Image: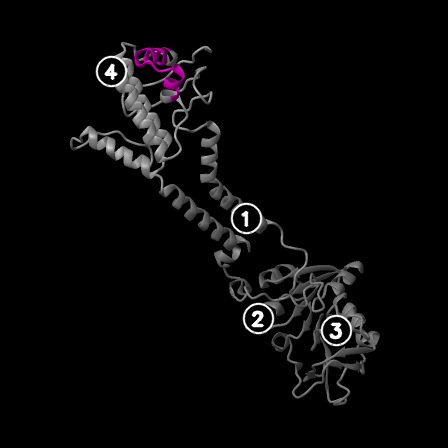
Amino acid sequence: MSAPVPVEQSVAPSVVRVATTTGGAPGGAVVGDGTTAASRAGRRWRRVWPVLAFLGVVAVGGLLAVLPEPRTSTTPLAPDNPAPTGARALAQVLGRHGVDVDYVRRIADVRSTAGPGSTLLVVGDYLIEPAMAAAIDDTGADLVLVEAPGVMLTVTDQLVPAAGPSGTGTVRDASCADPDAQAARTLVASGAVQATGPDAVICFPDPATGPDGSGAYATVTDGTRRIAVLADSAPLTNAELDDEGNAALALRALGRHEHLVWYVPSLGDTGMDDATGGEPDLLALLPPVAPVLAAQLLVVVLAVALWRGRRLGRVVVEEMPVVVRSGETTRGRGRLYRRARAHGHAAAALRAGTASRLAARLGLPRSAPAPALIDAVAAASGRPTTDVAALLYGPPPTDDTGLARLARDLDRLESEVHRS
């Protein structure tokens, strides 16, 4: 028989903690409640892995949200859009010719970056309000207005949108004395603007209507500032930049200064505080990813609240207001074990109670080692030590039938010892 290992056991029927190793006990290591360190770790892991997985997904989503925005976009006529409707090719050519392209989408950025000695390109004005158009006029920069009739009417009184049909994507000759238009010679465009003042120069008239005073491109010199108006944005796109003289006109019109502010209005820039110079909205100062991070933080808080809210805290021992009979406590605990299918815990309780009563019957101390108790019980009952070890310290049952059989065998063993 191998050297005994100290046994930790209590004589109280409701407290069970038994661990021993005996040479005669089947199964080698004796486990009181049927669990091991590995099984308990696995059970804890199964409880927490969904929470860890959820937190991992939230963390990855937050990391992706705070990463820098991609270098390309899908915004029409944007200088970082490589699609056919974008204008990345034009921006790259301008950059290779020494033009510093500053892409902005807010009127506040226009006011802070554009000024005298620079060129301000305004692409579309359906999101631009009158006060924003006035802010564009106040910059003092040379203006290139593309499909922006509202801004055109604000910054000059010598040009107006032409009425009536203007053709669709036709090849037009310059037919004017403007040097930029003369360098381009021809242009593929639609739309038209009309001159209402003597200082306006109209170029690229529609060949279907003839020289009626309107064209796809117009320029006005207002003091030291030059205003160029292009009625159609197609010549600037990646798809049509290399058609006819589109590239020549675009490069000369936008490359007059080393600094080009490329303004494409955004949907979130309709407030007028920035345009009028007032205090901006506090929400406008937040980064674009702030709403995403706030939503993710709210989800995390709710998940943690649900997770932690289910825990009742540590068990608190307090005096019971009524006297509960021991039999009711035993039956209640048995029902709990049965509902939880805790066959190991129930078997350990039965074995601990039996071991305590047998030790007291045989005159052994509470700290008696398991081998001594097994030998004493075997001698008193006449059973082999292996049978006694299997009953008192064997592996736990795995079902209700095994648990009931163990209870009957322990009761029979206790009866045999009492009769001796």
**What residue is shown at x 80% (from left), y 70% (from top)?**
242
Q: Nearer the viewer, mark 3 or mark 1?
A: 1
As displayed, is residue 83 above or below residue 165?
Answer: above
Q: Which kind of residue does numbered mark 3 sit on?
A: Pro
The reply to whether the magenta stretch includes residue 389 is yes
- Looking at the picture, tell me which residue is in the foreground, 43 or 182: 43
Residue 235's disc number: 3
Distance from Cα at disc 1 to Cα at disc 4: 70 Å
Q: Along the horizontal axis of the image, is 128 left or right of 172?
A: left
For marks 3 and 2 on the same chain, the one whose residue lies earlier in the sequence: 2
Q: Nearer the viewer, mark 4 or mark 2?
A: 4
Disc 3 to disc 1: CB gap under 8 Å: no
Percent of width and height locating residue 134? 58, 70
Percent of width and height locating residue 55? 50, 44
Quadrant in which the N terminus is drawn: top left
The residue pinned by badge 2 equals 127
The residue pinned by badge 1 equals 62
The residue pinned by badge 4 equals 418
Percent of width and height locating residue 269? 55, 64
For marks 3 and 1 on the same chain, the one whose residue lies earlier in the sequence: 1
Q: Which kind of residue does numbered mark 1 sit on?
A: Gly
Disc 1 to disc 4: CB gap under 8 Å: no
